[in-house]
Image (cartoon, rainbow, N blue to C red):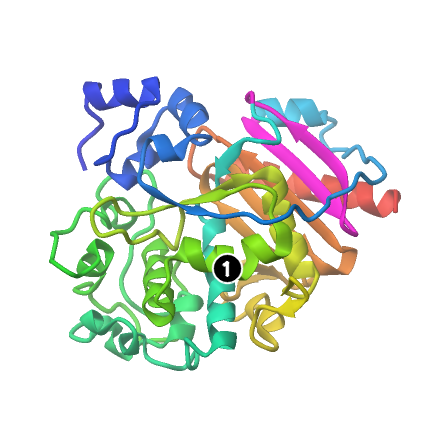
Amino acid sequence: MKHLSLAFVALLAAGCATPHARRTDVLFWNQAQREANFRAMDTQYASNVVKHGVAHPLPAGKPIVPAFDDGISLDGYMADHHVAGIMVVQDGKVRLERYGLGADARTRWTSFSVAKSFTSTLVGAALRDGAIHSLDDKVVRYIPELAAGAYRDVSVRQLLTMTSGVRWNEDYSDPHSDVAQMYEGRRVPGEPLLVTYMAPLPRAFAPGERWVYKTGETDLIGILINRATGKTLAAYLSEKIWRPYGMASDALWLKDDVDGTEAGGSGVSATLGDYARLGQFLLDGGIAGGKAVLAEGWLADATKKHADIGTQGRGYGYQWWTWDSGAFAGIGIFGQLLHVDPTRHLVIVQLAAWPVATDDAQAKARGDFVRAVTRAIDANP
């Protein structure tokens, strides 16, 4: 991938729509571009609208003040890590809400890989509806274009747990990695561009043998949902959760501007409050509009450890990061977080524009923030 042209950078800085911008160029924006465009992704890329319903209330609860181990203040933490919004909801009540970078309650901020957990949840809905027959179905039942390559023996469950065994490079800083190149394949009429890229990838391990994080595979899950339900991800999300549960604002889901395929592995933009409502929907058992939305047992299965990621006390479920404590999270590059702790009836959301996609120092600081919030909750029930 070549670096952004000066003309393209000028368009980004001006906030002008660029209908043929490459979706992975976002990985190489500078800090000013990130802070300007993470709140306005629809000005850079094509998208579908996720229609909202009548707002599910999030009343104010008893305020908390997180205390960090290093003595930094919450304002200091937010400034140091370019945080646009923080919300803490416990027992359905807002115990902390704070904004930065000029964002407010109406700002729609991109989620990056937090969207993977949205896509996973829609699999649970499609299973309940019977659109997806079984997690043990082969992926090619729904995406037959993959039948000639390494994905021919991979199950839906193995896609969900990122244990397909197909070779992949998720290096966000490398313009030649798979994650940077996955929308750069050749166009084949009637075939999503992402499928064209993924179909010839070689096998590195036997299916189910090893966990390797792959954004492209969540995009495949999104295409699978679209094929199974006959609906866009945005329309299905609106029908099953966004409207009946009562999200307060429309969301956006980015799509390819030629083939219309939404990016199941990223691309959702929503308000801080609506990300928190999604977490609360899960704590409420996946009930929306008085009806069960997800397949029986889905939540418990999706949010438990299915794959070993090589980190003590943690694992990977169905597109959720898991902790042995029972907590689970959707985590996105550049600082996004949707953390759900069922034992505390707790949801923590962070929206940010980190100066790097991810590194150990930024990830540690985000973990320290979660621990500071948890301590404050435990000390002030």
Residue 159 lies, in percent from the top left, at: 38, 68
**Is residue 73 shown left or right of residue 176?**
right
Determine the residue positioned at 38% across, 69% down.
229
Q: Relative to 253, say whether 245 is above or below.
A: below
**Is residue 39 shown left or right of residue 337?**
left
Dividing the picture into quarters, in which one does residue 372 lie? top right
**Is residue 51 shown left or right of residue 212?**
right
By secondary structure, the bulk of the magenta-drawn segment is best described as strand
User: Residue at label 1?
Assistant: 239
Determine the residue positioned at 29% across, 40% down.
24
Determine the residue positioned at 55% across, 53% down.
242
- Say if residue 369 shows up in the picture: yes
Residue 29 lies, in percent from the top left, at: 34, 28
Q: Amino acid at mark 1?
A: Glu
Residue count near mark 1 (Cα–Cα under 10 Å), binned few <14, some 14–19, many ≥20: some
Residue closer to the observer: 373 or 244: 244
Determine the residue positioned at 52% across, 76% down.
128
- Say if residue 117 shows up in the picture: no
Q: Is residue 271 magenta?
A: no
Residue closer to the observer: 45 or 344: 45
Q: Relative to 290, say whether 251 is above or below.
A: above
Q: Is residue 93 magenta?
A: yes
Q: Secondary structure at mark 1?
A: helix
Region of the chain picked out in magenta, as a range? 81-102
